[in-house]
Amino acid sequence: MSSYKSDSPEYLLQYLPLAGKWMAALSFAAGSLILGLFLTHPISDIVILGFYYLVLAVSGNTIMAIVLLATAVFYPPHRSASLTTILIMLVNVPVAITYFMIVINS
């Protein structure tokens, strides 16, 4: 359990890596769901939904990665967890590119 007080910044910062991992997992799941919908029902509305989702996911994940990077730089006790989470989040990049190429080539 944490030794930080619940009103300290360190208390909240310890949960950022967990939030980043959840964001990465949810981004992967939502992107996979949208791709699955497109492959089973190839209509333009799903492509538009996928595009908006891609913009939203890239924006949100980029902001989270920047926050985690700042946490790693300015709060050394959280460095390892923050950098590990950034690496986990980066796994979604080639997945998103692959999904995009599947849609483009369909």
Image (cartoon, rainbow, N blue to C red):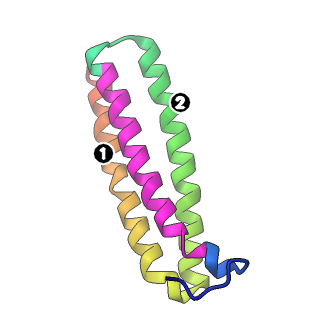
**Label located before the other in sequence (1 or 2):** 2
Left or right, residue 8 beside residue 41 = right
Local packing at callout 1 (Cα closer than 10 Å; few below 14, some 14-19, many 20+) is some
Name the residue nearer the viewer: 85 or 103: 85
- What residue do we see at 30% from left, 45% from top? 95
Q: Quadrant of the C terminus?
A: top left
Q: Was residue 19 drawn as part of the magenta stretch in this picture?
A: yes
Q: From the viewer's perspective, is residue 19 above or below residue 101? A: below
Name the residue nearer the viewer: 77 or 99: 77
| Residue 27 pos. (x, y %) | 43, 45
Left or right, residue 63 beside residue 90 = right
Give the residue type that dot 1 points to.
Val
Q: From the viewer's perspective, is residue 3 above or below residue 13? A: below
Which numbered marker is on residue 95? 1
Give the residue type that dot 2 points to.
Tyr
Name the residue nearer the viewer: 96 or 16: 16
The residue wearing badge 2 is 52
Where are the magenta residues, as a range? 13-38
- What residue do we see at 50% from left, 43% from top? 57
| Residue 103 pos. (x, y %) | 31, 25
| Residue 54 pos. (x, y %) | 48, 37
Left or right, residue 37 beside residue 18 = left
- What residue do we see at 36% from left, 41% from top? 29
Name the residue nearer the viewer: 82 or 104: 82
Local packing at callout 2 (Cα closer than 10 Å; few below 14, some 14-19, many 20+) is few
